Amino acid sequence: MFRQASRLLGRASWLRPRPFCTEVPAATPSADPAFVEAWKKVAPNIDPPRTPSTYMDPRPPIPSSLPSKMTVNFVLPYSSELSGKEVDMVMIPATTGQMGVLPGHVATIAELKPGVLSVHDGSDVKKYFISSGFAFIHANSVADIIAVEAVPIDQIDASLVQKGLAEFTQKLSSATTDLEKAEAQIGIDVHSALNSAITG
Amino acid sequence: MAMAALRREGRRFAISPNPIAAVRSSIFPAEEQAPLGVRSISTQIVRNRMKSVKSIQKITKAMKMVAASKLRAIQSKAENSRGLWQPFTALLGDSPSVKVKKDVIVTISSDKGLCGGINSTSVKISKALNKLTAGPDKETKYVILGEKAKAQLIRDSKKDIELNITELQKNPLNYAQVSVIADDILKNVEYDALRVVFNKFQSVVSFLPTVSTVLSPEVVEKESEAGGKLGDLDSYEVEGGETKSEILQNLTEFQFSCVLFNGVMENACSEQGARMSAMDSSSRNAGEMLDRLTLTYNRTRQASITTELIEIISGASALEG
């Protein structure tokens, strides 16, 4: 029964495409040698624990000439929406406003506010509404976008957005403490961004 | 004389099944050893034992099935969360050998037991990390998630435990809950580096102890000035927020909540997988024990039948002549 269970699990995992590499390389040289040394001195009988760098594929080096496409990794806590996708441009909702990112963009760390993220691949445009997060643009034309929640725009219900906006506006006017005011303000910000996302 | 012969027969039958007697003395307490010449011990004791072993086998089989179904549910979520920490490691690198003044070791363990050795492994690694980061005017504290690590660490490091969080899995794990916990830890614990210790789920039978390091914003700045893995950090432009340190503050807090979320999911998967294999080997053991007991039971039963027959027959032959 146990064998069957592991076979079923194994089969199911092959059917689902794996975005990030979940295979674990055995003791790769990218393990931190100083750490392993220090560990062996303190606890020689225990194997040193793995570190995250051993589970990751190394990133591509910085190309000398301008690449034609950039790679986008868009991750959420519950899924990796896009992983290693080659696209032409991404528009991200940074706190300073909408920012367009093309291949060869300067390395940037951007904090994101609730808004629309659009991924342009040729004539194909995919739009997501994301809650806040971070975006890292590396010098090798790889963009990492991490958000807490993301929904494709067409799945947003306009009537619920209006209702939420009205509710939070009312909460702001009846708020007494600073905390309540801040929470209501956040609600209003998110809902007005949602509103402009559906209409704009 | 017939009685003497009978007694001799009885004694012979009490002595000759020596292996049974040896087995009997190992399984049963000494006071059930039958006095010589009396019918051998009742089969009731063996039968009771068999009943309890059979019910244990059923329970462990059921626990294995439950663990297998929970594992199926949580495994896909854990694998989906694996992309979450990779951007941070790509940006900030991975520096487990960083030397800081205040280390905080966040040990992730389970609340329930019967899950093999994963909690002991996590505790062993945490203690070794403690030794590794110890030094003059350095302090290392623990933050413990889960009951099992608390029980082990409270014995010798009671004063080092800052925070203890239990009952994580009462509701299904989600990011909101973990980010609240992360917020709690970040607010109440002073740290220069957070080391998250958990068991990464590689497969149903293999779990790799892992330690993920999250540095505080001040340490990130210091390390980036010193060069090395974080040296490229200065080359990054900063959008939003006036200074780099403001962004770094949000960044490291976000990193911690993402790393903690992934660690908690992986550990939950490892817990279910370890419980599955522990319960499987336990039901297999119970099955073997049941086989051995059945043999003993049959031997005992047959021996008592044989003894009865012999009594009857020798009694009858004594009567005849």
Image: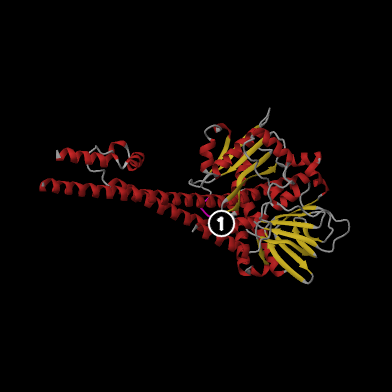
Q: Position of residue B63 (x, y in %)?
A: 45, 53
The residue at 27%/40% (across/down) is B14
Above-or-below relation of B265 to A194: above
* Residue furthest out toward the top: B136
Tell me the crowding category of disc 1: few under 14, some 14 to 19, or many 20 or more residues within 10 angstroms, Cα based. some
- Taking depth in this image into account, of B144 and B311 the one nearest to the observer is B311
The residue at 36%/48% (across/down) is B293
Per the rendered image, the range of residues in magenta is: B169-173
Q: Is residue A196 visible?
A: no
- Callout 1 amino acid: Ile
Residue hosting label 1: B74
In magenta segment, residue B170: yes
Q: Is residue B100 left or right of residue B128?
A: right
* Residue furthest out toward the left: B320
The residue at 52%/37% (across/down) is B152
The residue at 65%/49% (across/down) is B259
Q: Is residue B108 visible?
A: yes
Q: Position of residue A159 (x, y in %)?
A: 61, 69
In magenta segment, residue B84: no
Quarter of the image where the N terminus of chain B is located: top left
Q: Is residue B101 left or right of residue A107?
A: left
**Main secondary structure along the magenta-highlighted residues:** loop
* Residue furthest out toward the front: B321
